[in-house]
Amino acid sequence: MEELRAQQIEALEVLCDYNQKLVKSIRNIISELKGERKEDTDQFLDEIIKGINWEIGVLNGTMSLINEKEERIKKEEINASISKLSQVLAEKKDAEVAEALEEALPVFEKFGDAAGKVLEEEK
């Protein structure tokens, strides 16, 4: 049990650093998708989606620790925003992808905040 907790804490430490970069990248890609498209926008979006998937994987593995003392993250909120994002990504319409990312952004900001709070409590 202690080993699992140590692994969860380590995962949250890595996530905290990565989350800040991901949130910044999401903000940047939103503006690109809203009309400031660049040559590498599609590649950038693919990398962001990989990052989102990685964070969701970390969330799934650390949810018990994150919500141990209080419910900080609601799985339903994440599922709803990710489900919408998945649907619009398949359609490949920039404006709709930008809108779905704007809706998902607070979820990832909240995830980063929650991870930070858990790590503070663990010190």
Image (spheres, rainbow, N blue to C red):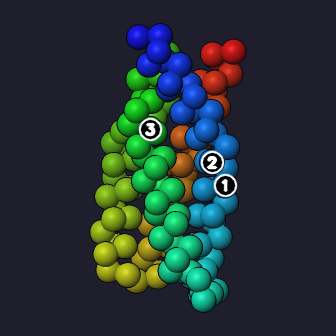
Left or right? Give the position of 35 relative to 98: right
The amino acid type of the residue labelled 2 equals Tyr
Left or right? Give the position of 63 relative to 31: left
Taking the view exactly as shown, the residue that stands out farthest to the front is 3
Q: Position of residue 123 (x, y in %)?
A: 69, 15
Q: Nearer the viewer, residue 96 or 41?
A: 41
Query: SS class of the residue under badge 2?
Result: helix
Q: Position of residue 31 (x, y in %)?
A: 62, 77
Q: Position of residue 115 (x, y in %)?
A: 58, 32
The amino acid type of the residue labelled 3 equals Leu
Say which residue label 2 marks: 18
Q: Is residue 52 above or below residue 36?
A: above
**Residue 102 seen from this side:** no
Mark 1 and mark 2: Cα distance apart in space: 5 Å
Say which residue label 1 marks: 21
Check contact, mark 1 vs mark 2: CB within 8 A: yes
Residue drawn where x is 54% and y is 33% of the image: 11
Check contact, mark 3 vs mark 2: CB within 8 A: no
Say which residue label 3 marks: 59
Q: Is residue 45 above or below residue 56?
A: below
**Dot 2, crowdedness within 10 Å: few (<14), some or many (≥20)?**
some
Q: How many marks?
A: 3
